[in-house]
Image (cartoon, grey):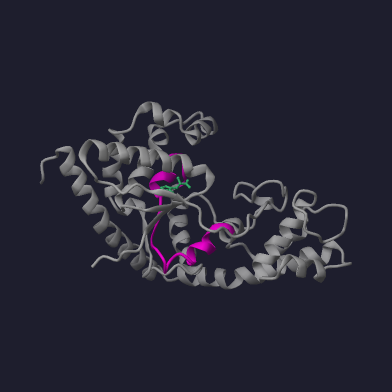
Amino acid sequence: MENQKKRIFSGIQPSGELTLGSYMGAIKSWVNLQDQYECVYCIVDMHAITVRQVPADLRRRALEQLAQYIACGLDPEKNIMFIQSHVPQHAELSWVLSCYTQFGELSRMTQFKQKSQQHADNITAGLFTYPVLMAADILLYQTDLVPVGADQKQHVEICRDIAQRFNGVYSETFTLPEPFIPKMGARVMSLASPENKMSKSDPGGCVYLLEKPEDILRKFKKAVTDSEAAVRFDPAGKPGVSNLMQIYAAATGKSLEDIEAEFDGQGYGIFKETVGEAVVELLRPFREETQRLLADKAYLEGVYRQGAERASRIAGRTLSKVYKKVGFLPR
Ligand code: TRP
C-alpha cells in the first residue's frame, strides 16, 4: 500500500553556493519534515540553463549540492533526491503543459520581467517558459505542498492554474499543489549591509557553507555594527548587531536575553569574534561531512541514480495518464 503522507516537492537551482542564510532559514527546517511528509528534492539543472552557466561549474555544483543536503541531515532513503535532467518526464510533461499555458499569463510573471532585464542580451524561450517546466516538476509527483519563498509564489499559482485547466478539460489528472511556508528559522541578513537579506550575490556580507574557517572569522570581524557599543536586540535601530545576535542564537541555542547578558559591558570586538567562532563550530562538522561525501563519488552516484529511479517511477505514471488523455497513440 502507498503511504498516506502528504507529498512535498522542492526544486533547488544548482546555480550558486549554499549560504549560512539558506542553511539557517530553510535547509535546517527540511530535516524536520522528513518523517512527517514524503519529500522529493530535485536539483533543477534544467532550470539553471535558462541563463548562461559554465558547464564544469554546473556539474560540480549539482554534485556538491547533493552532498551538502545529505550532510545537513537529509536522509536519501527517507527522501527522494535526484537531478532533474536524469528524469526525462520533466521535459516531456513540460512540452504538453506548454500547450495548455497562455502566452499572456507567462508574460505577466514578475521573475521573467526581472530576469529579462538582467539578461537583456539573452532573453530565451526557455527563460519565458521556465514556469511551465516548474509546473511539470510539481505536477509529475502529484504534489500536495511546495515550500517556497515569496519570490516563487506566483510560479506555484500559475502551476495551479495550469493544473486546474487541464483537469477541467480532461477530468481529474493532477493534484492541486499549495504553497507551503515551513516554520522558518532565522531570517539571516547580510553582514556587510544588514538591511538586506544575506545573498550569495554579495560575497562580502555572505558566509558560504563550505567556506574556510579563517575566511568566516574575517567576515564576522568586519561585520557592520553601529556606534553605540551595546549588544542589544533592536532590529530597526541596530540591524547589524541584532542580526549577529540572531545568528549567534541560532548557532548556539541561547536566548536573546542570555546573549545581551553575556556581552553586557563588552565591546563589539569580542562579540563579533565570539559569533564568528560559534558559526565556524556550527559549520565544521557539516563541512567535514560534505568533503567526506564528495570524496566518495561512488556513493553519491548511487544516491542520485536510485533517486532518479524512484522519481521516474512516480513521474512515469503521471505522464502516461497525461499522454492517454491528450490522445497520443500508446506505443
Ligand atoms: N524556481 C525555483 C527557484 O528558483 C526552483 C524550482 C524549480 C522549484 N522547480 C521547482 C521550486 C519546483 C519548487 C518546486 O527557487
Q: Is residue 299 above or below residue 246?
A: below
Q: Residue furthest top?
A: 104
In the rendered image, residue 251, in percent from the top left (x then y), is placed at: 65, 68
Q: In the visual, does 174 lie left or right of 245?
A: left
Q: Residue 31 colored magenta?
A: yes
What residue appears at the point 56 percent right and 58 percent down from the top-left corner?
184
Q: Nearer the viewer, residue 300 or 283?
A: 283
Please tell me how many numbered marks the rendered image carries: 0
Q: Is residue 213 visible?
A: no
In the rendered image, residue 106, in percent from the top left (x then y), is placed at: 40, 31
Q: Is residue 101 above or below residue 58?
A: above
> Hey, which quadrant is residue 271 in on the image?
bottom right
Q: Residue 323 colored magenta?
A: no
> Hey, which quadrant is residue 108 in on the image?
top left
Q: In the visual, does 300 lie left or right of 230?
A: left
Q: In the visual, does 272 lie left or right of 293?
A: right
Magenta residues (range): 25-54
What residue appears at the point 48 percent right and 66 percent down from the top-left corner?
31
Q: Is residue 308 visible?
A: yes
In the rendered image, residue 49, in percent from the top left (x then y), is placed at: 42, 43
In the rendered image, residue 220, in percent from the top left (x then y), is placed at: 73, 60
What residue appears at the point 42 percent right and 43 percent down from the top-left corner?
156
Q: Quadrant of the N terminus?
A: bottom left
What residue appears at the point 37 percent right and 55 percent down from the top-left corner?
83
Q: In the visual, does 79 lie left or right of 236?
A: left
